[in-house]
Image: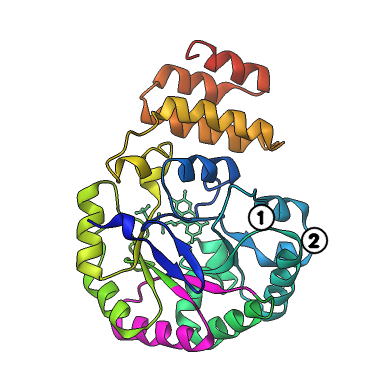
Amino acid sequence: MKTEKGFSIADLKMNNRLVLAPMAAISDLPFRLLCRKQGASLCYTEMINAEAVARNNKSAFRLAESHPDDQPLGLQLFGARVESMEAAAKKLAGTEKFDFFDLNMGCPDGRVLRQGAGAALLRRETRACELVKAIKEAGKPVTVKVRLNPNVLNSIRVCKALEKAGVDCITVHGRTVKQKYSGPVDFVSIKRITKAVSIPVIANGNIRSRKDVKITLEKTGAAAVMIGRGAIGNPGIFADLQGHLAIKPINAMFNYLKLFEEFGMDKFGRKKTQVIRFLTKVKKQQVIELVQKAGTEEELEQALAELK
Ligand SMILES: Cc1cc2nc3c(=O)[nH]c(=O)nc-3n(C[C@H](O)[C@H](O)[C@H](O)COP(=O)(O)O)c2cc1C
């Protein structure tokens, strides 16, 4: 397995082939920094609502915040309206520090699909290409993250159209919308897409071990692999996948909390959810119950005190 070989997106060079997935309420700035320290060569923000950014919504801008150590970074947008997408991309390119945009074309959530966004764009090829072109107006490279269509020929056609519209890299989660997050990853379809386009493809789905990385890279011919759920509560997976000593989830949790404080993040609900995810990895059920009940910062501190 040659994860150390690296790969490129446009002019951007990554030093290995392990990428952290965009994950709502997970892939925030502190979490990305932890994953990078453990060896993720590229990270993405969680999906950010283009409509909210276009309306200057403060919370949406907060999701886009980064740091000089948080590079290279892809900023993921979701939306379906060309005008707001272009406005959002321009606003973010002018204020935030990141390397490229990513368009979400894989989210299977009903609220997103009903807007015609996320995975709904897999069936709206023309609109998807218009959105890509609108984002490109902001002057940065653009990538997309797709799921598979039930018919692989459709997937290939969409990916080729996206490439023609100017996309610099495609991440393929090798499942259909109907499959959501379970069932086998379709390596054959990812490989057919990889062969059909001339831009790099990142393969995504179910990577937890070095063997998974090796098999996914071999079977898909992808330039890199993207890791989602395997990293939740366990940023050390990136060290582990490269045969390096990994940080323990419990230590990662305390580092996460320190960074959360340092960056002045204030979403208590998010903090609690992340803490529970780290604790789930170390099977601290009693502490998890205390954390779940915590309604204030003090109660959360108390719940975690015995772990220090
Ligand atoms: C909690 C959670 C949040 C997610 N949020 C996003 C998101 O914001 N944008 C996106 O493109 N995909 C999102 N995904 C999908 C992941 O990026 C990834 O494609 C999927 O989990 C499959 O990879 P895995 O098997 O390694 O988890 C999310 C997945 C999870 C579990």
Disc 1 Cβ-to-ligand 1 distance below 8 Å: no
Residue 80 is tagged as none
- Left or right: residue 39 versus residue 244 is right
Of residues 141 and 174, the one drawn nearer to the viewer in this rendering: 141
Quadrant of ligand 1: it is bottom left
The single residue placed furthest to the right in the displayed view is: 56
Quarter occupied by residue 232: top left
Does the stretch in magenta take in 266?
no
Q: Position of residue 19 (x, y in %)?
A: 42, 55
Of badges 2 and 1, the one in the foreground is 1
Label 2 amino acid?
Asn
What residue is rendered at 67% in x and 22% in y? 297
> Quadrant where the N terminus lies?
bottom left
Q: Which residues are magenta?
A: 140-169
Query: Is residue 194 found left or right of 266 in the rendered image?
Result: left
Asked whether residue 182 is in view, the answer is no
Image position, residue 248 (x, y; %): 38, 28
Q: Position of residue 290 (x, y in %)?
A: 52, 18
What is the number of callouts on the image?
A: 2
Pointer 2 local density, CA inside 10 Å: few below 14, some 14–19, many at least 20 = few
Residue visible at 20% across and 65% down in the picture: 218
Residue type marked 1: Ala
Give whichever of discs 2 and 1 has the lower sequence position: 2
Instruction: Say left or right for 273 vs 279.
Output: right
- Above or below for 270 versus 111: above
Q: Check disc 1 and report its element: helix, strand or loop.
A: loop
Q: Residues within 10 Å of mark 1 (few under 14, many from 20)?
A: many
Query: Which residue is denoted by mark 2 in the rendering?
Result: 56
- CA–CA distance between discs 2 and 1? 12 Å
Q: Determine whether the residue tagged by mark 2 lies in a helix, strand or loop.
A: loop
Residue matched to label 1: 64
Q: Residue at x 63, y 34 (%)?
A: 260
